[in-house]
Image (spheres, rainbow, N blue to C red):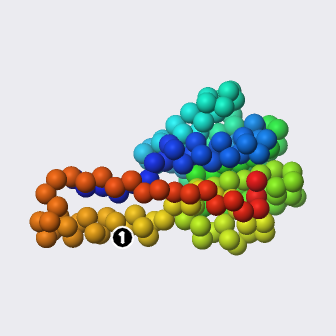
Amino acid sequence: SCSVTIDDVAITRQAIRHLAEKGHWRIGGLFGDPKLNITRERFRGFKQALQELGIPFEEHLTAFAQDSEQGSQMAMKMMEQHQISAFFTMSDELMVGAVQAIEQKRLRIPEEIAIIAISDGFAPEFYNPKITHIRHSGFEVGANAARLLLGVIREEIKNPIHVQLDCRLVELGSV
């Protein structure tokens, strides 16, 4: 079978390394449904990056949330109970929740707390400052998958093909 993916472990490691390069060592991680492979891969990337950087993994600095509202509650709890200097959010939805919590606490981004997300690049543009993110394109994933599917249907593709798309760091104003 053919597939089109992004390297969820690598892009998460890239995000965490970026935070660390900017001086952030107490990083709160917000993740989605732990039953989903994408969540498990991004969580694995988070833990790997911390290990590579010599930052101890602290379970209470990570949370799994089903939606932006739950993400906001988890972010608020992390800020109230632990001295974190930055958030990593694995999706736009969780980024929205984290920013809501940060605004509720009246903290300034990036002066008092930083945030980085994995995003398709649409939602980060709506904030002030704009949110630094690792950009991936759902459109590109879909377009490549459709191209592969057509190739299989037309019998132009005989063997399984795996396409891994690149993602890039978009440095804006939140770190």
The residue depicted at 48 percent of the width and 65 percent of the height is: 137
Residue sitting at x 56%, y 61%: 135
| Residue 95 appears left or right of 82 | left
In the displayed structure image, the side of residue 56 where residue 13 appears, left or right? left
Q: Amino acid at mark 1?
A: Ala
Check disc 1 and report the residue beneath it. 143
User: Does residue 34 appear anywhere in the picture?
Assistant: no
**Residue 2 against residue 153 in the figure, above or below:** above
Q: Position of residue 47 (x, y in %)?
A: 58, 34
Residue 35 or 42: which is nearer the viewer? 42
Q: Residue at the location (34% across, 66% down)? A: 144
- Viewer-proximal residue, 98 or 137? 137
What SS does tag 1 mark? Answer: helix
| Relative depth, front residue between 106 and 56 | 56
> Number of callouts in the render?
1
Q: Nearer the viewer, residue 54 or 122?
A: 54
The percent coordinates of residue 118 (x first, y second) are 58, 56
Q: Is residue 87 visible?
A: yes
* Horizontal relation, residue 118 to residue 3: left or right: right
Quarter assignment of residue 92: bottom right
At which x and y percent is residue 149? 23, 66
Q: Residues within 10 Å of mark 1 (few under 14, many from 20)?
A: few
